Amino acid sequence: MIFSCIIVDDEPLAQSVIESYLKNVPSLELKGKFDNAIEALTFLNSNDIDLMFLDINMPELSGMDLLKTMTKKPEVILTTAYSEYAIESYELGVSDYLLKPIALPRFLKSVTKVVDTLTKEKNYKEGGGDKPRYIFIKVDGINLKLMLEDIRYIEAYGNYLKIFSEEKMYLVTDTMINFTKKLDDDFVRVHKSYIIPISRIEKMIGNRIHIGEDQIPIGNTYKAELKVKLTNK
């Protein structure tokens, strides 16, 4: 699949770097480069774009202000030399936040994740794939997109839930019962304090499920449901 993208940055060098990096990503087609956010907004109002590389600090209208004015946004990867906008940017639903100077490996990691999300969404819309496997979680007042496939397991923690992913742990205010409703059929509650994805199970020894180096207990109340899930897989 080929997805469209644009670059919005008032620095010619920054535009050139991103454009050169895009040559390593055949699934992305560059549709335009813009020196300011107003020109980009005009273009976006009449063109469907999948991904926007957006600088924050620009004259007239900043990248953050552009995001706040848009009701329908493409996937957005922010590019900036300043780290202090990271928290606010994720609150606006951006996909990633790249600090300049941007290294190629970091760029490719970011783009690969976005392309993967776009591919799943397009497959679903065209009826050729499963429902996109992601949810939004609120962390410190910020809505973050979390891919379900990145979740290792979920643990109850008082009035909170700890969501363990490949890269970090997220602490969210929610209940086990309510959060289970947001998950797909790959997930099963195996203990009063744990939810796991079946696909993550590496082995089961006694009343313990092994997910990498983590051992998750199996509660007696949940054994029957787990057995049904495993049988149907």
Image (cartoon, rainbow, N blue to C red):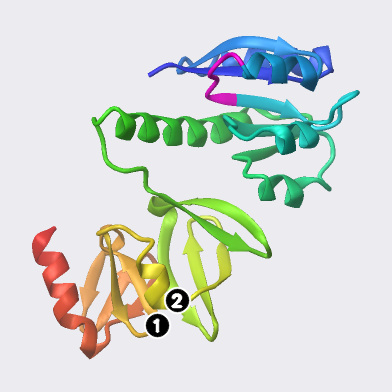
Residue nearest the observer in this picture, 176 or 186? 176
Q: Residue at x 13, y 74 (%)?
A: 227
Q: Residue at x 43, y 70 (%)?
A: 154
Q: Position of residue 71 (x, y in %)?
A: 62, 35
Q: Residues within 10 Å of mark 1 (few under 14, many from 20)?
A: some
Q: Quadrant of the N terminus?
A: top left
Residue 193 image label = 1
Q: Residue furthest right?
A: 59
Q: Quadrant of residue 190?
A: bottom left
Q: Residues within 10 Å of mark 2 (few under 14, many from 20)?
A: some
Residue nearest the observer in this picture, 213 or 28? 28
Residue 36 image label = none
Q: Position of residue 43 (x, y in %)?
A: 66, 13
Q: CA distance from mark 2 to mark 1?
A: 5 Å
What is the magenta range? 46-51
Residue nearest the observer in this picture, 49 or 233? 49
Residue 206 left/right relative to 36: left
Residue 159 left/right relative to 1: right
- Main secondary structure along the magenta-highlighted residues: loop
Q: Position of residue 4 (x, y in %)?
A: 52, 17
Q: Which residue is mark 2?
A: 155
Residue nearest the observer in this picture, 143 or 17? 143
Mark earlier in primary sequence (2, 1): 2
- Which secondary structure lies at badge 2? strand
Vertical relation: 131 (above or below) 176: above
Instruction: Give the total of numbered labels.
Output: 2
In the rendered image, residue 151 lying in the magenta stretch gets the answer no
Q: Quadrant of residue 170?
A: bottom right
Whether tag 2 and tag 1 are in contact, CB under 8 A, the answer is yes
Q: Residue at x 73, y 20 (%)?
A: 8
